[in-house]
Image (cartoon, coloured by chain):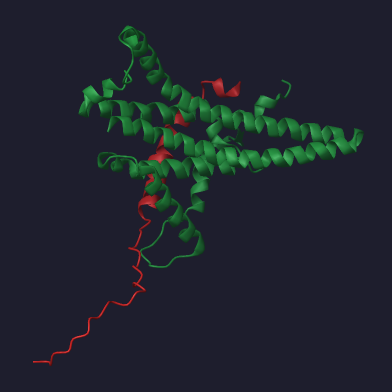
């Protein structure tokens, strides 16, 4: 079986231990649980600031009923951003490149927002399927279109995260291979490719953070419509 | 594409949700946010002069 570039995304296992389990459990050692002390160390101070500011900014447009989701959103954000960022280190496995994980997060959470909307305010939730000011003749068509877009949301949410991270990792591997192969043949081109690799890695760091943020932001928007 | 391989998908699903629900929320909830100390206003309160005796 020849090695292809996609093989980096296979769930790896070392000596029978699925490394997915390690990749999902070890990052949380970087987040110590704070004690009731007033003053902690620098790391906890930074994490405290991040969680507080993030929750504040995210919950700003939500009505008070949506503030119950604060813990879930903060946990989800920490989860995604640390998995994404740690995956950029060499030889680490990124669990968020697995479609099973991303769809498994996106579909239940989206479904939860829809069910909450349908139970508590069904008229308003269904009213989102028809934007204001549509011409009368277009109403049936637009309802169909809006329903389709509603049901595409969980798929888009999951696949967006998967595709962005997978594409990024693939690009890094491709360009790194190119730089490595070109080194004995055309050193100048190899150095330029190395510079491109450096810029790409910076981009991937940004993409890792942005994609985690977009995931949680979109979920909060779906909640905002329904709560 | 290896991501489309269905064999570990259920285990990944369950394990990832387990971590998200069991491991992280206690760490998040344990963060407390003390009230910010309010700065004392820089302007001095306006005092009006009074020229009548104490009583």
Residue at the limit of the structure toward the top, as seen here: A137
Instruction: Kindly indicate the quadrant of the structure image that contains residue A134.
Output: top left
Chain B colour in the picture: red
Q: Image height check: is A156 above or below A191? A: above
Q: Would residue A151 be visible to someone looking at this image? A: yes
Measuring from the top left, give residue A70's x and y in whole percent: 34, 44
Q: Residue at x 72, y 25 (%)?
A: A3
Instruction: Kindly indicate the quadrant of the structure image that contains residue A131.
Output: top left
In the image, which lettered chain appears green?
A: A
Measuring from the top left, give residue B32's x and y in whole percent: 35, 58
Q: Nearer the viewer, residue A48 or A138?
A: A138
Q: How many marks?
A: 0
Pick the quarter of the image with the N terminus of chain A. Answer: top right
Measuring from the top left, give residue B19's x and y in whole percent: 43, 40
Pick the quarter of the image with the C terminus of chain A. Answer: top left
Measuring from the top left, give residue A152's x and y in whole percent: 43, 19
Q: Image height check: is A147 above or below A212? A: above
Q: Would residue B23 be visible to someone looking at this image? A: no
Along the horizontal axis of the image, is A84 left or right of A147?
A: right
Q: Nearer the viewer, residue B15 or A111?
A: A111
Residue at the limit of the structure toward the right, as seen here: A185
Q: Residue at x 63, y 38 (%)?
A: A204
Residue at the limit of the structure toward the left, as seen here: B55
Along the horizontal axis of the image, is A216 left or right of A17?
A: left
Q: Residue at x 43, y 37 (%)?
A: A216
Q: Image height check: is A149 above or below A112? A: above
């Amino acid at each position: 079986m020849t090695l292809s570039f996609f093989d980096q995304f296979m769930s790896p296992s070392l000596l029978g231990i699925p490394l997915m389990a390690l990749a999902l459990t070890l990052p949380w050692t970087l987040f110590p649980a704070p004690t009731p002390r007033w003053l902690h160390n620098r790391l906890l101070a930074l994490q405290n600031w991040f969680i507080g500011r993030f929750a504040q900014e995210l919950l700003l447009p939500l009505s008070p009923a949506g503030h119950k989701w604060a813990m879930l959103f903060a946990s989800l954000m920490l989860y995604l951003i640390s998995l994404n960022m740690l995956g950029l280190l060499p030889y680490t496995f990124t669990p968020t490149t697995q479609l099973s994980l991303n769809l498994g997060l996106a579909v239940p959470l989206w479904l939860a927002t829809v069910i909450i909307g349908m139970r508590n305010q069904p008229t308003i939730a269904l009213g989102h399927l028809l934007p204001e000011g549509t011409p009368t003749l277009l109403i049936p068509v637009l309802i169909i279109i809006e329903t389709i877009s509603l049901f595409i949301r969980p798929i888009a949410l999951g696949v967006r995260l998967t595709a962005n991270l997978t594409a990024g990792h693939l690009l890094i591997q491709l360009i790194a291979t190119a730089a490595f192969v070109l080194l004995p043949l055309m050193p100048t081109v190899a150095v330029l490719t190395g510079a491109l690799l450096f810029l790409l890695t910076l981009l991937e760091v940004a993409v890792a953070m942005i994609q985690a943020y977009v995931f949680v932001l979109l979920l909060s928007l779906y909640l905002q419509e329904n709560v | 594409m290896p991501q489309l391989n269905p064999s570990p998908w259920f285990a990944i699903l369950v394990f990832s949700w387990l971590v998200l629900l069991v491991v992280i929320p206690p760490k998040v909830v344990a963060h407390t946010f003390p009230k910010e100390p309010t700065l004392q206003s820089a302007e001095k309160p306006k005092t009006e002069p009074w020229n009548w005796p104490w009583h």
